[in-house]
Image (cartoon, rainbow, N blue to C red):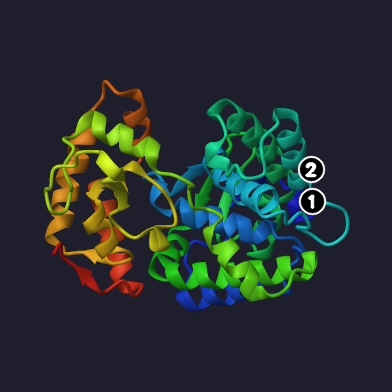
Amino acid sequence: MSHKLKVGELQETYLTDEDIWRTFTIILSNKSVKSSTYKYALIKSLIENLYQVNENFELTYDQLAYSFTKVYWNLIVTHHLEKQNRGKNARVVTIIKEAQRLYGVPNEFSFDKISEEIQIKIVSKVKSTMKENVFGALYGDTKGTFYAFDHKKEYFKINPPVHAFMLNYQRLIVNLTNYHLAAMIEQLNEVPSINYLLGKVESIARRSSLRPFEKLLLNHFEARCFYCNKTLSGHKRETHVDHFIPWSFVQSDHIWNLVLSCHTCNRSKSDKLPKREFLEFMIDRNHVLTNKQEDQQVRSMMMNYKERKMVMLYEYSIKNGYDTIWVPR
């Protein structure tokens, strides 16, 4: 059985978009072997880390396990949706419920609000469950064509054509995954309707606050709006942190995609893409962060950043329908 595999090698390196769509259709449908929400959580974790792969298209198990844990913590603790598979409780549910009880975490705490020390302990246990029940299972559903993995080395390698496909159709894949995840949770938890769940599913990867990034950016840059250059006084919550490429597309919070913004620009920009000249400013800004070698926290956050990734993200967001270009008033 594929879920018991400890190593999975790529079975096919050349795939067409039609090949990949055909496999995605099977994964997202009830034809898939997995009768739990694990497959959807893994896809959401991959999407969140699409721009974090290294030069060999590899991710660490820790990267994926963090995103995977965050999805389930916010479903189980914040939204009280504990049924995640057919039959007995999913192991990840037990891990998270036990951790919440052990550390006395309130229900209203999203995953990013928990201390880093506790996060690491929970992620480590979830990672072990992913090794047992997740990586091999989805590998089997894709017939080994989407990714390779190795439990001992704890690395996960996306097939380059699949990576390119997910970038190109990212918005559609996100919407399809959210819909099917919500549909399965609705069936398992007997909640009112899929419309009730979609809003919750769409937001489970979002941070509750970007305040830690604000402090970090203010340590290295003047308190000025990235877009209009207005001085940010800090009064009346005037200083905001904005996703340069909209969060609804990138589905993750990385410092290389976050800027300081005034309230006016943040509200006006909303879910739009900034004018292309701001992309050049962003690249220059990130060059400054890349050179902050003395700041270990920033250095680790910029580890997999490349200038071409920022350009690629901008261009793929346009391909995915973010073609309403915004300029400051």
Q: Please name whichever residue, 250 or 264, is drawn nearer the observer in this view of the structure.
A: 264
| Residue 262 visible in the picture | yes
Image quarter (top left, top right, bottom left or bottom right) of the N terminus: bottom right
| Residue 180 visible in the picture | no
Q: Please name whichever residue, 294 or 305, is drawn nearer the observer in this view of the structure.
A: 294
Q: Is residue 167 above or below residue 258?
A: below
Picture coordinates of residue 308 (x, y %)?
24, 52
Please name the residue shown 51% across and 49% down the image.
Answer: 157
Q: Is residue 28 above or below residue 292?
A: below
Please name the residue shown 43% across and 51% down the image.
Answer: 252
Q: Secondary structure at mark 2?
A: helix
Residue 82, located in which quarter of the rendered image? bottom right
Q: Are marks 1 and 2 in contact (CB under 8 Å)?
A: yes
Picture coordinates of residue 112 (x, y %)?
52, 40
52 with respect to 129 (left or right)? left
Question: What number is the disc on residue 266?
Answer: none
The number of numbered badges drawn on the structure is: 2
- Residue receiving disc 2: 94
Instruction: Give the residue type at disc 1.
Output: Ala
| Residue extending furthest toward the top | 294
Q: Is residue 151 above or below residue 2?
A: above
Residue 97, located in which quarter of the rendered image? top right
22 with respect to 53 (left or right)? right
- Residue receiving disc 1: 90
Instruction: Give the residue type at disc 2.
Output: Thr
Please name the residue shown 32% across and 33% down the image.
Answer: 215
Picture coordinates of residue 103 (x, y %)?
70, 29
